[in-house]
Amino acid sequence: MNAHPTIIPAIAEDGSLYPVEKLKAHVDGLFHLAVSIFVFDGDHLLIQKRASSKYHCGGLWANTCCSHPYWDEPIDSCARRRLNEELGFNVPLSRRRVVEYSADVGGGLHEHEKVTMYVGSAERATLAIKPNPLEVEDTRWITPAELSDEIAAAPETFTPWFRIYAERYPDLKV
């Protein structure tokens, strides 16, 4: 693989992919590929607080893991790789659906993504979570009802995409 971590696949109007620098995709609001992962223990979802040093949405709560594939990386490989890189564990993941969303993420940056969503399950009592401090400040488990209440009370503490997912898929089983 000739992947370069800052080059991601953008989507042209005809549906074809082309390489673009990750920051340019967000500055220009280019339509690009992404993954979002949701790991559950029963009805509890593992969420992460993004590292404050992240180039956008630092310090905000998000779903278990989200990222962009490298330019020539298969989307399923990206999901597995990023879960391990961000949280230090692997669980089997099932591809659930592909969605599109667009959101202002602050600082002059904009997400316009075609997101492949994955679900995994784990037992929190035995799951060894080892967050990468460059990516993740904190983790916790939350039910969809608790998440809904927290988003209603303090939406600014959650990433824009996570709020969109919670609204579209209230049970978050994507």
Image: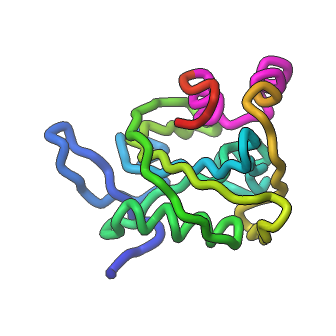
Color theme of the render: rainbow
Residue 63: image quadrant is top right
Look at the image and tell me in which quarter the N terminus lies.
Answer: bottom left
Viewed as shown, does residue 12 lie left or right of 146? left
Q: Residue at x 48, y 43 (%)?
A: 27
Give the camera-side residue of 141 and 70: 141
Across and down, in percent, residue 87 comes to: 70, 66
Viewed as shown, does residue 112 lie left or right of 19? right
Q: Is residue 137 above or below residue 27?
A: below
Q: Is residue 110 above or below residue 56?
A: above
Extreme residue in the bottom direction: 1
Is 105 contained in the magenta span? no
- Secondary structure predominantly adopted by residues drawn in magenta: helix
Which region shows up in magenta?
Answer: 148-167
Give the camera-side residue of 124 and 140: 124
Across and down, in percent, residue 127 comes to: 77, 66
Give the camera-side residue of 154 and 94: 94
Could one spot residue 133 in this view of the protein? no
Could one spot residue 171 in this view of the protein? yes
Viewed as shown, does residue 105 lie left or right of 58? left
Is 153 contained in the magenta span? yes
Across and down, in percent, residue 90 comes to: 61, 70
